[in-house]
Amino acid sequence: MANYVIVGAGAAGLYTAYKLLTSGKLQNTDTVKIYEWSERAGGRIFTYRFQEPAAWEKQGLYVELGGMRFAADPCFPHLPSNNCEGHVLVQSMILQLGLQDKVREFPQSSNRLYYFRGSNVYEQNLTPQAMHQLPYGFNKQFFDFISQIPQKPDPNPITADNVLGQIGSDFASNLGSSNAFRAKWCHYFAAGKVPASNGTASFPAGTAIRDIGYWNLLYDQLGDEGFDYSADGTGYTSNVINWNAADAMQANNDYSSTTQYKRLDGGYSQLFESMADVIEKKGGQIHYGKRLLSLEESPDRTQTHCTFIDTNGASETEIADFLFLAMPRRSLEMIADECPQTYMLNRPEVKLWIESSIDQPAIKAVMVFDEPWWTSPGCAYPPNLVWPSDAPKPAPAAEQQVGGATITDLPLRMIYYFGNNVPNGPGNQNGPYVLLASYDDMSYTDFWRQLELSGDYSAPPSSLRQPLSGPTEVDPQSSFAQLLRKQLAELHGIDVEKVPLPRAVYFQDWGQDPFGGGYHGWAAHYNICQAMDLIRAPYAKILRNSVTKTFIVGSCYSFDQSWVEGAFCTAQSVLGDFFGMPADRYSSGYHLVCGQSD
């Protein structure tokens, strides 16, 4: 009899349990148990279904407070037998669980609206000539750089995405975005060097890319204003922080505004709720409301004693023969604080690799309105619009302006217009209308974090955590809501009174404990391939202990750190390499993780 204990019912934990229970390789006496701190499955995938008023619940009104889309093969859900593109394992799981009929296009604007330093511009108007009209003090180095961005056969707007894409083309020799190139990217992570054509006094040709911070590199290549434009225009501040430049090349090259994204109608959480259902039907156990407090090796080191505490403060101990820690860096560190100093997570050799991943805080703020005020002509054509005289007039807003992202340098950062967000929608129903009023990360999250509380602290700030039971609701009259309205008005060039009071306002702060971040990135000065490979099995691969069977899985230490795919891939790599459980046919030849030999 073997006891498989999985801590965390997020994407990696659920995938691990699902595959163990459907593999046909377990004995009848084996047990598979998941322990989850919250009361739901999915982790940082969280489809919030409005429960009040009753009319909203009846409609099925929902919003994605966490991950909301996946990169899809152009022909999905009719996948080829192999060489599937996009997020291979996610698409495979959707098929296995029979959710393919719920797959829909993820609505995106084909002509995004930007707001930079008080001026608006539409994406199609970002011609090389229009760059002189933007409120930036670009230097000659930046203009020389953007002159390299191809403009034939079709005009290519000088978006921040395309600027960073050109950096990737220059430094990564056009490794490409196809899954077939994942193995080449792994090699680049380990051995990529500054090419002769891009060497500078700061980073001479031959410098290892992994030893360069991306912010350092962008400043050196684009100048300060060129960097600021790139930071403002992607919407994701995490894309341009001082993370591992080799990782940044891949992340900014593989998934851009042109990537084919899809969603699940009715919410992404359906994938994880379906996995949880299968796990329980197959005899697995999911224990919700159970927080892992500490871990300790058994005297003979063949097992791990796991101490959990429930919402009432009662503790229990589970003995694991095989332990899967399906959690990100911050959660691991919180557990390590409660473990003996001799425990694996506190060993310097292991901490070295735990700290190879950077936490990237992220916040989503949602507003619900009775009308789609953002479709008015004044919002579609702001008065401060940068509009080259020879450029075509941008298309007017759609009836409900479903799409996005509108990108701004305001603390809002990104706005998605979801409209009447209901199953089989969004349609032309008469409201309510859902606006993802802010999707921001990194330093911008602190703007909103100071608004999460009112009055003086009543507990140490370090003890504050994002509630695990659901998003935080705030009063539509609160400072939080009013600053959302003020910035939306500024972005759209209208008086704040024309942004009506919302019916409801919610936010989800993924930077608070126990998550630490909405997503992660690899730190500079690490060989990513080595880190990705070692951290999966810290006992076996770092401490050279083949007796204690503990594994770390999740997107935090993956090839795809901002995606469910990364969680699935690390879990599948552990199951394949240490338990002999192969992946399905769609991932034949698919590079799950990077290895030390890459």
Image (spheres, rainbow, N blue to C red):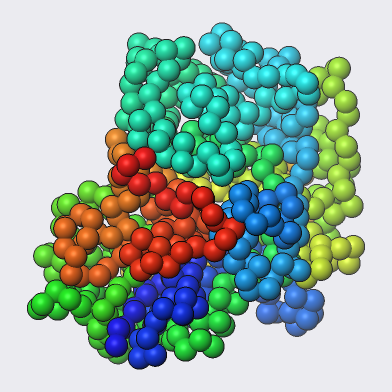
500 displayed left or right of 24: right
Q: Position of residue 565 (x, y in %)?
A: 53, 56
Total labels drawn: 0
- Residue at 42% across / 40% down in the picture? 186
Q: Quadrant of residue 195?
A: top left
Percent x, y of residue 289 = 42, 82
Say if residue 484 shows up in the picture.
no
198 w.r.t. 356: above or below: above
Note whether 239 is above or below 130 in the view shown: below
Instruction: Note whether residue 393 is visible.
Output: yes
The structure residue drawn at horizontal position 68% and vertical position 35%, both measured from the top left corner, is 115
Q: Residue at x 36, y 74 (%)?
A: 7
Residue 16 appears left or right of 496: left
On screen, 544 above or below 234? below
Pinpoint residue 70: horizontal percent, then vertical percent: 62, 55
Q: Residue at x 69, y 39 (%)?
A: 258
**364 or 163: nearer the eye?**
163
**Occupied quadrant, residue 347:** bottom left
